[in-house]
Amino acid sequence: MIAEAGLAALWLAAGLAALQFVLMVLSLRIQFDGARSMRSIAVVQGLLTLVAFAMLLIVFARSDMSVALVFENSSAVKPFIYKVAGAWGNHEGSMLMWVTILAVAGAFVALLAHRTSERTLVAALGAQAVLALGFYAFLLFASNPFARLWPAPPDGQGLNPLLQDPGLAFHPPTLYLGYVGLSVAFSLAVGALLTGEVDSRLARAMRPWVLGAWILLTLGITAGSYWAYYELGWGGYWFWDPVENASLMPWLAATALLHSINVLAARGALKAWTMMLAVIAFSMSMVGTFLVRSGILTSVHAFAIDPERGTFLLALLAIYVGAAFILFAVRGATLKEGAPFELVSRESGLVVNNLILSIVLGVVFVGTLYPLFVEAVSGEKLSVGAPYFNAVAGPLALILAALVGVGPLLAWRRERRPVFGQLTIPALLGTSALVITIILWPGMHILPRLGFTVAAYLVAASILPLVNRNPFRAPLATWGMVVAHFGIAIALLGMAANAAFTSERLAIAKPGDTLTVGPWLVLLNDVTPTAGKNWTAVEAELRATRGANVVTLKPQTRYFSDPPAETNESAIRTFWNGQLYTVVGKPDASGAWQLRLWWKPFVTLIWAGGALIALGGALALLGRLWRLFWRRRADAEWHRERYA
Amino acid sequence: MKPKNQRLVLVVAAIVALIAAALLAMWGLRSQASYFYTPADIAAGKAHEGEGMRLGGMVERGSIRHLPDGVTIRFMVTDGKAQTPVIFRGIPPDLFREGSGAVAEGRLQNGTFIADTILAKHDERYMPPQLGNLSAEHKAGKTLEK
């Protein structure tokens, strides 16, 4: 019954979305005031999807094997948290989560949006309904999560052990919230293009959504990178895998949007540009969803023989993106020109930021899709990996990071002061870093060397907006910007240190043997069997010493029975100046074990930087919401006094 | 600057960025994209020695051998038509086992493939795109087993 209730809630929600769209057309075409009813419909629609999602959680929590999805992705002996998380660790469940977030976001727009005009809100809610409608259709016709199995099998097929990890249970929801948060920016942009009301009011309404989505994407990417680092047992933090690029592309677009939206909000300039970015940002979210969910990455061939889902998603993508671009082409040119600015100004700086981010987005997009395209057209197979992305995106990212230090110093509209004088100390720091790395490590590769240079400069340059003024009177948004830019410098430092100074040791050892890696002496004490709820393992006990420091690490190789698989569980110990990373492999015939050891100086700065960037976003969001709250109170008081 | 001119400058800037991205991507792809070969391609002489490439196929059952240093493995990759010997120094990723698909990155040297990395899969159902045909056959086999 529970599964059927979930399905019914989905059908009802789809019906309401259709109604919401009809009301929008009526409201915009004829004299008909649908705003109030559309708002209520959007809220009820959001609640219904929540009900459907709750039903899915319940069937997973109870291990109801008569539901096909539970049978395929769960098993009765799993830990409870992974039973629940299993609900979104698969295709149908994650698409349901996607739609739920989309509809709930629509409900919040309906509840909270007071800043756009009523007409734009109506148009935006209509656009959101059309988006939701397509994905409801996808769920109901091509990916029903509630399909039943008859007769019900006794136990399920289990969840991939790699996915039985707390990080991964919460990783997809974070990313999805980010992806789908951008749908609001998309709908608001489409709404504003329809009504022609692209102004700073719209930008202020859009900004919290973009900020929120961007924060979650940043967190999702940072956490995903750390997950890949410790779970895959390779010691790498970013593999330029298409699945990773699928989350990076919306982030790049959202970062550009986040910067241009400030220009629109503060100065009323860059109107068409910002609308374009809002459309692109959510388009990238849909491209990412298509890449991950259509099965095209699994194989172009499988996509061709079982094309239903992939074609459906591709059609949705083409329709939405195509329609938005056509709308943009028709209405973009009719928008009023924005406020003017001079060549040297904050606006120009942000335009340059946007251009570089767009180029990076372009090359990542091409590199990710090119192999699929070539294979689909000619059948020839090739792969585009880290060498391509590092070569084309690396230098651009460094240039962008260097400019991050300059942009915030410029004044709006025009800059006549000699601002570059403020950059003396940062420039000196950068130059010294360059000279020191050349003297001490002449053999260092060029990218990490430049990474150290730019990072040293940016550490100082990023905090300049708080210097020469009372930092405690600076708005929270300024603090947010400074913290986020400082985070870029920190992450860059970590990447450069990891690339330049990692030491690696791969060897076999018998209990009692000692290996060295970097400054560490590592003794293999013993290897013992151990077991968990649904796995058995061999566990190595390593004692690592560095001077007076002695630590014990216990890496494992785990064997899972349903489905049969094994995973390397790395053991990592964090110190202030780096991480010791250990993996145990298999024994050979003589009873010696494969060990892989890394000493990675300052590698943690990569994720610390990512966290700082997200924290900066959170501070900015808090500042904006705080001001909004006070402004609304002040408005209310003003009204009371005036009309009392 | 007049607003009209400003818009023109912005449009031109956007187009320049687009072209720059396209040129950069083309340059990168020309020099950095690596081709994917199967053992049959290598047997037919399509791959050049020393060039960076990927090799994909199934790890032949019973073929994994540990060399005396203990950390180097040697195995055969097959696509049903031909076989290529692969040497890999390191701990192979999770889910690497005999009889399942694998993709190795590296170079050919005297007919042996020297792998720098063996690709890991993010999840059980994910296969590098180039393994398409093989994984479809593999899946068909799996269904038969059931």
Image: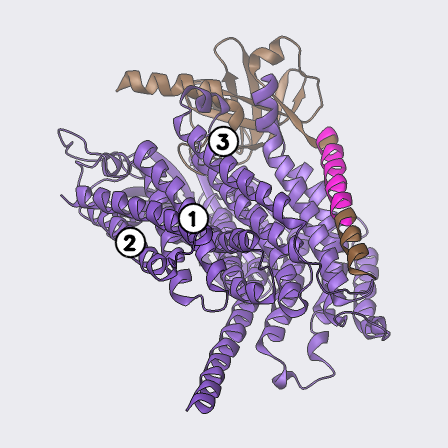
Chain colours: A purple, B brown
- From the image, state whether disc 3 or disc 2 is nearer to you: 2
Residue with the mark numbered 1: A25
Residue A297 bears which disc, if any? 3
Vertical position of residue A640 compared to residue B12: above or below:
below
> Are dots 1 and 3 on a single chain?
yes
Chain bearing tag 2 is A
- Mark 2: secondary structure: helix
Identify the residue at horizontal 60%, vertical 59% (top origin).
Answer: A198
Identify the residue at horizontal 78%, vertical 54% (top origin).
Answer: A441
**Dot 3 or dot 2, earlier in sequence:** 2
- From the image, state whether disc 1 or disc 3 is nearer to you: 1
Left or right, A65 with reference to A496? left
- The image quadrant of residue B135 is top left
Chain bearing tag 1 is A
Identify the magenta region: B13-30
Indicate the position of residue A61 as horizontal and vertical percent values.
21, 49
Please state which amino acid type lies under the numbered disc 1: Val
Of the pair A273 and A193, the residue shown nearer to us: A193
Please state which amino acid type lies under the numbered disc 3: Leu
The tally of labels here is 3
Indicate the position of residue A456 as horizontal and vertical percent values.
74, 65
